[in-house]
Image (cartoon, rainbow, N blue to C red):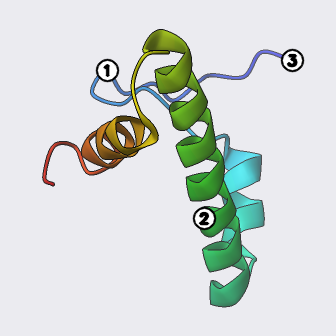
Amino acid sequence: MNKKLRLDTGQIEVIDDACARIYASKSPAERLRIASGMWRSAKKLLTLAIKSQYPHWSEQEVCREVIRRLSHGAL
């Protein structure tokens, strides 16, 4: 299999064409459910990573940092 990859230097993740077709075939509700699950997973992983990196932080400090990172510093 000699597939040419679509790489964009300004983007880390590049979705595979087959995956893009699968997501495009989903209903808006299904896509929203998938995105929501991905958001929850990212938040959970980030929370665990911060707790591991800063074990002395309180739950409030961890939560504040998770929000800051997920909002890209907007909050």
Which residue is nearer to you in this view: 53 or 29? 53
- Looking at the rendered structure, the kind of residue marked 1 is Thr
**Could you tell me which residue is drawn at 26 percent across and 51 percent down?**
71
Q: In terms of depth relative to the viewer, which is nearer, 32 or 57?
A: 57
**Percent position (x, y) of residue 70?**
35, 46
Q: Which type of secondary structure does the marked residue at label 2 adopt? A: helix
At horizontal 61% and vertical 56% (from top left) the residue drawn is 40
User: To which residue does mark 2 refer?
Assistant: 35
Q: Earlier in the sequence, mark 1 or mark 2?
A: 1
Camera-side mark, 3 or 2? 2
Residue at image mark 3: 1
The residue beneath circle 1 is 9
Q: Separation of disc 3 and disc 2 at Cα?
A: 30 Å
**Corner quadrant of residue 24:** bottom right
Sequence-wise, which precedes: disc 3 or disc 2?
A: 3
Q: Residues within 10 Å of mark 3 (few under 14, many from 20)?
A: few
**Residues packed near mark 2 inside 10 Å, few (<14), some (14 to 19) or many (20 plus):** few
Question: Between tags 1 and 2, which lies in front?
Answer: 2
In this picture, is 30 found above or below 7?
A: below
Q: Residue at x 86, y 17 (%)?
A: 1
